[in-house]
Image (cartoon, grey):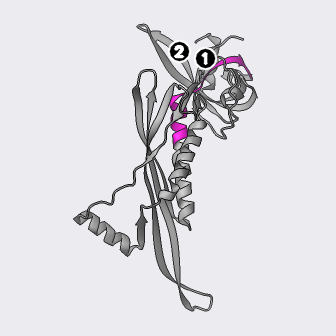
Amino acid sequence: MKKFLSLLLIASFAIPAISYAQDNGLNPRYTVTVTHLAYRAPEKPKPSVGTVFTRIADAAAGVISDINNDAYVPMVRAEILSAISRVRRLIVVEDADVATDYVIYGEVTNITANRRVEYRTVKDKQGKERKETNISYSANVSASLSLKEVATGVVLETNVFHGETYFSTFTTIDESIRYSIRRMCSDIAHHYNAAFPVRANIVERGEEKKDKQKEVYINVGSGIGVAKNTEFNVATMGTIAGQTTTKIIGRLKVKEVLGPDISLCKVNKGDKEIKAALDANQE
């Protein structure tokens, strides 16, 4: 089957467990070690006119902050490791003595919980008033992670990731912190999946309708962790002054995964442009 257009993975939903089968060469996998993540508890800010007024306002609103949540550090580390293990093109190696392609290291920089107490007066059906107390929690979690290439020793990037929850949603500190950790780690997995994108080629046409391409087959599947509803950008490739160029012309969504290296996709955007590019045998 002829390979026509290049695709770049942009998002995924319902990430499955990845089997490390041999892929088609488009998506080499790299090994990565996640080092022990230190915990740097945030320092309480020194009093200033601004912070004093902020604390007064918070106290008036019934808001109390607690930065001493060290007990959640092991959970944060475990969830970060789990997030990186969901990156399709990275294989996490937990043996520190094994040489790897990359190292991810950093520190947990914040685990803060906030409690808000609200009082209100309500009336029952008989018009009798009573006092009600409502307690809710919010949380903020953050971590700074760096990606280093082992062969060169070059730190390729450093990013700070955040997870946050808001008042009126959670009724316990534990729920709020745990959800914030999950939100942060979801962003971590998304970020590194984008840093190591999955690529594919359209290898066969599917359903067509006049001048529109409705479905196509691509040469990636379960072997690299592609699942139903995974989305791809479609790009035509070119060369200018010896440099490769790309032009995004559409978007696909995986309709059905048919095997380790084959999936059926629905064309969600650019159906005319994709068919015209296929007709012209564009790369």
Residue ranking furthest to the top: 242
Of callouts 1 and 2, which one flags the residue occurring earlier in the amino acid sequence? 1
* Residue denoted by label 2: 237
Magenta highlight on residue 193: yes
Q: Secondary structure at mark 2?
A: strand
Point out the image quarter for the C terminus: top right
| Residue that appears at 62% across and 10% down | 281
Q: Are marks 1 and 2 in contact (CB under 8 Å)?
A: yes
Q: In the image, which residues are magenta?
A: 188-206
Q: Residue 281 magenta-drawn?
A: no
Query: Where residue 88 sits: x, y (%)?
Result: 61, 31
The reply, left or right, for residue 99 in relation to residue 152 is: right
Which numbered tag is attached to residue 263? none
Kindly identify the residue that appears in the image at 56 percent across and 55 percent down: 179
- Which quadrant would residue 22 be assigned to in this image? top right
Of all residues shown, which one is farthest toward the right? 258
Q: Residue furthest front?
A: 97
Residue that label 1 marks: 5
Check disc 1 and give the amino acid type.
Leu
How crowded pointer 1 is (Cα within 10 Å; few <14, some 14-19, many 20+) is rated as many
* Residue found at x 34% / y 57%: 43
Kind of element beneath mark 1:
loop
Percent coordinates x, y for residue 257 in the rendering: 74, 30
Q: Residue furthest left?
A: 49
Q: Is residue 170 left or right of residue 268?
A: left
